[in-house]
Structures are given as structure tokens and as C-alpha cells.
Amino acid sequence: MAPPSELSVEQLDATLVLAFLEHLEKQRENCARTSNSRLAAIKTFFKFLEYRLPSVLDQARRVRAILIKKTDEVIVG
């Protein structure tokens, strides 16, 4: 796999994003909240791209359709 600095926008598809989120949870042992936070940032970036690069509109919509994971809410005592 190429280093992140060599990736083009066209290579950032839903499959790659899902693989990244799985990597966060499995190899780096991050919780679902962390991956949800990263996913929110990625979705925001793709929303920005929809207006700047119309050629990636379909790709952006697929990425933005990825669902967040359910997490338990922590009740503050």
C-alpha cells in the first residue's frame, strides 16, 4: 500500500475507509467511539469534496452512507 501522502482522492473509496476503520478497532485496539469520530471527519471531508470535485460525487455518496457503530452512553454520576 502506498503511503498516505501518495494517495489520490480517487483511491479513497468506501472499501478503503471501511478497512481503515477496521484497522483502528482490530490492530490499534481503539473503541467504537474513536472510529466513529474518525468516520465523522472523513464524511465531512467528502461533503466538502462533493462541491469541489464533481467527478467524485458518486464515490463521496458511498463513503457518506457508511453507518456509525452503536455505542453505550456513559452516564455521568
Image: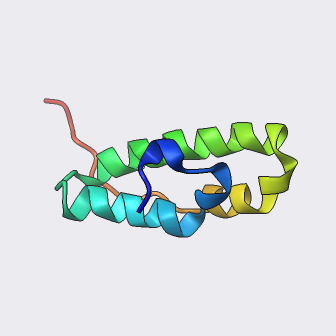
- Residue drawn 59% across the image and 46% down it: 43
Q: In the picture, residue 14 is in which quadrant?
A: bottom right
Which residue ends up furthest to the left in the rendered image?
77
Q: In the picture, residue 75 is in which quadrant?
A: top left
Which residue ends up furthest to the right in the rendered image?
54
Above or below — where is 69 with respect to 75? below
Above or below — where is 15 with respect to 43? below
- Residue drawn 78% across the image and 45% down it: 50
Quarter holding the C terminus is top left
- Residue drawn 19% across the image and 31% down it: 76
Task: Pick whichever, 10 or 5, lies toward us.
Answer: 5
Q: Position of residue 22 (x, y in %)?
A: 33, 65
- Residue drawn 16% across the image and 56% down it: 29
Q: Position of residue 70 (x, y in %)?
A: 37, 59
Which residue ends up furthest to the bottom in the rendered image?
15
Above or below — where is 40 with respect to 67? above
